[in-house]
Image: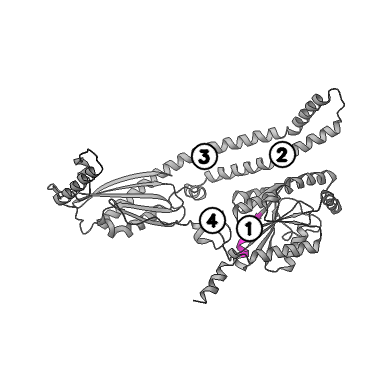
Amino acid sequence: MTGFARVRRAIGKVEATISVKAVNHRGLDLHFYAGSEIDPFEAGMRSTIKKHVARGHIDVRVQLSSVSDAAGFTLDKARLAGYMAAYQEAAHQYGIATKPDLSATFRIPGILNDASGTELPAAFEQPFLELLEQALVNLNEFRTREGSELVAVMRERNRAIAEAADQVEQIRGKATAAFHARLRERLTDLLGNGAVDPQRLAQEAAMLADRSDIGEEISRLKIHARQVEDLLSRENTEVGKKTGFSLTGNEPGSEHDAVQNLGHRRGRPRDHGTRAQSQSRYREDSRTGPQSGMTNVFIVSAPSGSGKSTLVRLLLKKDPKLLFSVSYTTRPIRGAEVAGESYHYITREGFEERVAKGEFLEWAEVFGNYYGTHRSVLDRAIAEDRDVVLDIDVQGARQLKSAIPDAVSVFILVPSREVLEKRLKSRSEDAEAVIQKRLRKAADEIRNYTNYDYVLVNDDLTRSTETLSAIVAAERVRRIRVEPVVRSILASFE
C-alpha cells in the first residue's frame, strides 16, 4: 500500500523537515535523500525505520535549513563563471541560440549558498530520530486507514464472488436436463420423424454433463472465498502478513542500502529476499522448488487402475532413500487399506479447514472426494535427507509442478482401454457405472501426458519397475542436482 507523511521541527538553529513516502514492495527497500551532514545518523535512521515498517519501497527525504534571523546568501562566482563558460561553449558548438536561466542556475548545488550555513548542534541526533519516528507513526496511520478501506472493498467483492458461485452451482444442477433437451432438439432436426432411443439419449446427456462438469472448480472457488473472508476478519497485522500488504509488524524483510545525497547516488539497490528465502533450506518461497543438491521430488500419476500404486510400492521397496508421501483424503477406507499408510482419512470439514490454512502443497476433488498432499512431507524429507515420491492425479501434479518446477513427473499408461477396463473390473471395488466414469476420466487424463517429463507404459510389471527405478537414479545425477558435490571436488584441487 502507498503512504505519505511529512513532519517539521526546529532543532536548535536548524529546521529539519522529513518526508516519508511508501509504496508496496515484497522487501524493505530503503532510499535516503539527504545532504552529507546526515551520514553519521544513517544507522540510527535505518534502525528506527525497521521498528515501524516491515516491508515497502520507502523514500526518506531530509531537508535542513537555518532558522537564524541573520541568515544571508553568498554567490560562488568562480563556480558560476565556470558554469556560464561551459554553457556558452555548448551553445556555440551545437549552434543553439539560447540564454541561461538564472533561476535554474541558482538551483545548481554550490552556486548560491546559505551564508549562515546549517551547522548541526551537538545534541542533534536524538531529537532528529524522534522526528523521524513521528513521521513513521504518521505514515503507518495513513497506511492503516488505506488498508481498512481496501479490506472493505475486498470483502464486498469477495462476497459477490461467493454469491456468484452459489448461483452457478444452482445452474450446474440443471445441466443434465439442459443437455438432454439440447440433444433431443438436435437429433430431431437431423432425423426428422426418426425414432430416438430414450435410454441412449439419457446416457449421452449424462456423459456430456459429466465432461463439462465444473463442480470441482465451484468447490475450490467457494473454499477460497471462505478463506478470504476469514482472513479479512482478522486483525490488520495478520491480514497484511497473509495478503502481502506492507503493514507494520507483518514480518521481517531484507533491506536495500540505496542512499542518495543531493544529486549524487551513493549506492545501488541490491536484490533482496523475502522471509521464505532466508528460512527455508528447501525452497526460496512458496512457489519455488528444491535447489541443486537438495531433496528431489518425484511425481507419479496415472489413470485409476493403471498399476501406479503397485509400481510405487515396489520402487519404495528397492530404494530406501525414497520417502512416500501419504495423501489426505475424505473418501472412506477401502478393503485392506491401512489408515496412515494408504491415506490419512479425514472428514470433508477437516480437509476444507486445512485448505483454508494453506497446509496442502496441492489438492483436488476427484469423484466427489478430496485428495491432498500435506506440506509436512517436505520438511520430513529434508530432515531425513531423503527424496519424496508423490502418488497424485493429473490435477494435483499440475499444481505441484507449478509450486515446485524442478519436480520430476512420470505418467503411467496401460497398453489399451480394454486392459484398463479389465483391471478395473477385476478389483471388484466399483459398480459398473463408476467403472465407466473412470474410463471416461482416464481418456481425459491421458491427454495430459505432454505435461510430464516421462511416460511409462506398464505392460510388464518387472520391466516397468526397473524403468521407474532407472528414472529416479538418472535424475539424481543430473548436473544441476550434483552441483554442490562437483564444487567441493573442484575446491580440493585448489
Instruction: State which region is magenta.
Output: 373-381
* Observer-nearest of 366 and 312: 312
**What separation in Å lies between label 4 and label 2 (alpha carbons)?**
33 Å
Q: Which mark is residue 407?
A: 1
Q: CA distance from mark 3 to mark 2?
A: 29 Å
- Label 4 crowd (10 A; few <14 / some 14-19 / many >=20): some
Q: Position of residue 74 (x, y in %)?
A: 13, 49
> Horizontal placement of 50 versus 264: left or right?
right
Front-lying residue, 79 or 394: 79
The location of residue 202, given as percent across then percent down, is 82, 33
Q: Is residue 257 left or right of residue 301?
A: left
Residue 154 badge: 3
**Which type of secondary structure does the marked residue at label 2 adopt?**
loop
Task: Let me know if residue 378 is in the magenta part.
Answer: yes
In front of the other: label 1 or label 2?
1
Residue occupying the far top of the picture? 193
Q: Is residue 288 above or below residue 182?
A: below
* Among the two numbered marks 4 and 2 on one chain, the one whose residue lies closer to the N terminus: 2
Q: Amino acid at mark 1?
A: Ala
Magenta residues, dominant SS class: helix
Residue 213 image label: 2
Q: What's under tag 4, amino acid-wise?
A: Asp
